[in-house]
């Protein structure tokens, strides 16, 4: 089959013309329904059909999804550009202390030197089908909320399995507006992705966590990769015989720069927003989720950073995790501050009161929508009733918990499965798995990392309100560190004798053990199972009441909604624009190399490499100088509606040419996940001219410069 872009997206049933185009993360079909005369007046010269056409694709189809980030094709030979931080984990995995590409960067002199990028995949949307009717039909006859969720899950699995019968196809189903619509996505997944150009960390992460979520920025957050396929164009795993993938559409790099007031368009895959929550749900996030998330991630980062000081190899191995967690940590702090500063809950309360008055004023509206507000508030109150406990379970049965605890929880699951089996092959497989889970690797980094994480877990358990206490796990009377030390001193789980008894019994020993670590893991696993069942029932209820709530909101506001971000292809339209950063401070929308050098102290995180400092001396003779600024532009601000997952998104001008890469938002806009603001919603992009200057003059890659059209 032809695995190039083949886009045939069925028009959705969303109302034709969205609201103000500067607010919103719009679906492709909604963009086509906009007023293109007004867009043309703002500088859009690409026609509606050339931007995106249901059968032919267009500029929009150059945007691809990249392992949790966004990216775009920028050449006919499968060249992909994304953020430095989006490829950071892959770069770390191919680095060693001796060849530290994280620190020093990487440039492939030719295609033969391009390195496989572990864990990186390029996903190309080929087709989207509206499957709303099929999934809504599957909901009918559900005996309760949990059954409704189960029926939807089963129908989604059926649709995905049916879709993946197509050769070289992966499928997913996305839900929009609490189940009002469902779309089935057909994708080509390219698994052979290679590193082409990675700037040194002192360029790609210039400013580090000091500048993260801040403005002004001078970060060269870019990396180039290349997607490969079999000679016939079909996707396959890495092979020396693979050839560069040939996309149908790719972006040309803009020859001209951007100026204040210019039209700018973000194309990518935003992860998650929560624009349509009620006041109750917002309060839960304000009071519990984000404050606890900030506190827990802060402590975990401290633990991992301290552990890395003991060994350069460990420091390198932990670098990607620390970087990822630090981003989440500062996001959480921004949410804490922003929800309070913007009085989001108070605004929701006012809107709910206005909605209730609108419903009450008309008998027809009372008949249609009279109960829906009470129902959605009841659902979110039920979720709030266990919010703190659910946070603790989710946090510590994940990457923020001690690995040995996760291993014991998984071992308990294996043991439960083996308990009902008499098949020799299944029992042998269970024994092998149990031996691995309780093996020597389970105690890796016990003193520097796991013990402090156990202590942190017990401290968080201690914080739980009485009505959300974890069953079977008493809150420690002393410190969390005391509780962790006592449990680890008493446990026999990782002794050879205990491990052997578990393996020999196919896990039966675990199911009845009174070992303190096993008891803790068993109680957490049981609570997690209860949580999962509770959440499934709540999902099923939201599929009913949430959909009706959205419909009522649309009727009240008299406008269609753009759906919350959910990792699907979206377009955000905006303008290059500054903002009022604080009382008496106005942030202009562009930065330059001069500002970068002014920040440069020679000490991390403001430690520009010598190659950049040297190149900067002659920069004003570069063809990438902005004539108005008289310098190489580095970053710019725009009022695009973006969120996590938009990292690496291409930013194009009205001609559909690449002008930059989205990589961050300003700190005042972190809370934008709950609502766009004309005054504060600003996203940050690295200017493509800075990227080109780095490729030509700082860490030269002449073949790449030529491939990009210069």
Image (tube, rainbow, N blue to C red):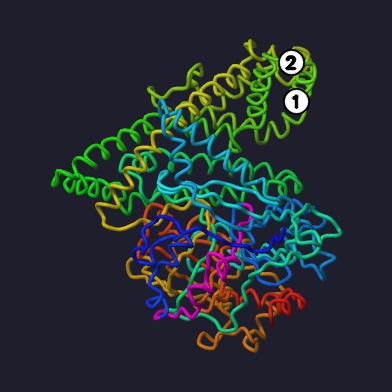
* Among the two numbered marks 2 and 1 on one chain, the one whose residue lies closer to the N terminus: 1
Label 2 Cα neighbours within 10 Å, binned few <14 / some 14-19 / many ≥20 = many
Q: Is residue 43 magenta?
A: yes
Q: Residue at x 62, y 76 (%)?
A: 252
Label of residue 164 in the image: none
Q: Is residue 276 left or right of residue 707?
A: left
Residue 244 screen position, x and y as percent:
77, 65
Q: Relative to 120, is 454 above or below?
A: above
Q: Is residue 243 left or right of residue 379?
A: right
Residue 51 screen position, x and y as percent:
52, 72
Asked whether the beta carbons under mark 2 and mark 1 sit within 8 Å of each other, the answer is: no
- Res 434 quadrant in image: top right
- Quadrant of the image for the C terminus? bottom right
SS type, badge 1: helix
- Quadrant of the image for the N terminus? bottom right
Q: Is residue 203 left or right of residue 534?
A: right
In front here: 107 or 152?
A: 152
- Res 690 quadrant in image: bottom right
Label of residue 433 in the image: 1
Residue stretch in magenta:
41-67
Label 1 Cα neighbours within 10 Å, binned few <14 / some 14-19 / many ≥20 = some
For disc 2, the marked residue is: 506
């Amino acid at each position: 089959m032809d695995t190039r872009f083949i886009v045939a997206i069925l028009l959705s049933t969303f109302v034709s013309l969205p609201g103000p185009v500067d607010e919103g993360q719009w679906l492709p079909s909604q963009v086509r329904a906009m007023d293109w005369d007004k867009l043309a007046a703002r500088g859009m010269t690409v026609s509606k059909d050339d931007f995106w056409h249901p059968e032919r694709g267009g500029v929009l189809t150059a945007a691809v999804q990249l392992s949790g980030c966004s990216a775009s094709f920028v050449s006919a030979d499968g060249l992909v550009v994304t953020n430095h931080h989006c490829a950071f984990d892959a770069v770390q995995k191919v680095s060693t202390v001796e060849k530290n590409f994280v620190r020093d960067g990487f440039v492939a002199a030719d295609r033969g030197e391009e390195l496989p990028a572990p864990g990186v995949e390029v996903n190309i949307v080929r087709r989207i089908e509206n499957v709303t009717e099929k999934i809504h039909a599957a909901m009918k006859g559900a005996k309760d909320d949990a059954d409704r969720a189960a029926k939807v899950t089963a129908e989604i699995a059926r649709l995905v399995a049916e879709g993946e019968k197509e050769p070289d196809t992966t499928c997913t189903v996305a839900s929009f507006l609490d189940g009002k619509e469902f779309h089935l996505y057909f994708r080509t997944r390219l698994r052979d992705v290679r590193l082409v150009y990675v700037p040194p960390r002192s360029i790609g992460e210039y400013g580090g966590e000091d500048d993260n979520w801040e403005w002004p920025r001078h970060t060269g957050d870019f990396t180039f990769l290349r997607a490969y396929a079999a000679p016939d164009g079909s996707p396959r795993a890495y092979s020396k015989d693979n050839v560069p993938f040939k996309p149908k559409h790719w972006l040309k790099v803009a020859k001209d720069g951007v100026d204040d007031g210019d039209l700018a368009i973000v194309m990518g895959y935003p992860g998650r927003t929560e624009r349509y929550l009620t006041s109750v749900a917002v309060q839960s996030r304000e009071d519990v989720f984000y404050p606890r998330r900030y506190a827990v991630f802060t402590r975990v980062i401290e633990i991992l950073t301290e552990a890395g000081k003991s060994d350069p190899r460990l420091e390198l191995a932990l670098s990607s995790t620390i970087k990822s967690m630090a981003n989440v940590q500062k996001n959480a702090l921004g949410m804490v501050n922003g929800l309070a500063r913007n009085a989001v809950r108070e605004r929701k309360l006012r809107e709910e009161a206005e909605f209730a008055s609108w419903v009450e004023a008309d008998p027809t509206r009372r008949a249609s929508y009279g109960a829906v507000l009470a129902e959605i508030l009841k659902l979110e109150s039920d979720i709030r009733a266990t919010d703190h406990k659910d946070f603790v379970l989710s946090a510590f049965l994940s990457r923020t918990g001690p690995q040995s605890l996760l291993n014991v929880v998984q071992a308990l699951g294996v043991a439960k499965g083996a308990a009902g089996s008499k098949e020799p092959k299944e029992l042998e497989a269970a024994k092998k798995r149990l031996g691995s889970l309780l093996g020597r690797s389970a105690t890796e980094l016990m003193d520097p990392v796991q013990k402090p994480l156990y202590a942190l877990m017990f401290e968080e358990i201690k914080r739980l309100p009485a009505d959300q206490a974890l069953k079977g796990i008493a809150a420690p009377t002393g410190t969390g560190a005391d509780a962790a030390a006592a449990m680890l001193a008493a446990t026999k789980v990782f002794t050879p004798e205990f491990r052997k008894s578990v393996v020999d019994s196919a896990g039966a020993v675990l199911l009845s053990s009174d070992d303190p670590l096993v008891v803790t893991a068993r109680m957490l696993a049981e609570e997690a199972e209860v949580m999962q069942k509770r959440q499934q029932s709540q999902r099923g209820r939201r599929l009913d009441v949430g959909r009706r709530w959205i419909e009522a909101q649309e009727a009240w506001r008299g406008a269609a909604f753009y759906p919350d971000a959910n990792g699907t292809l979206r377009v955000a339209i905006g303008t290059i624009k500054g903002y009022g950063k604080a009382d008496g401070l106005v942030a202009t929308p562009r930065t330059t190399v001069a500002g970068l050098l002014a920040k440069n102290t020679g000490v991390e995180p403001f430690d520009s490499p010598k190659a950049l400092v040297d190149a900067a001396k002659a920069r004003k003779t570069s063809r990438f100088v902005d004539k108005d600024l008289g310098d190489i532009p580095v970053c710019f601000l725009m009022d695009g509606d973006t969120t996590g997952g938009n990292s690496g998104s291409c930013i194009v001008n009205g001609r559909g040419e690449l002008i930059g890469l989205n990589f961050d938002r300003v700190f005042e806009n972190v809370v934008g996940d709950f609502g766009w603001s004309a005054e504060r919603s600003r996203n940050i992009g690295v200017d493509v001219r800075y990227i080109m200057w780095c490729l030509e003059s700082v860490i030269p890659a002449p073949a790449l410069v030529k491939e990009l059209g210069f």
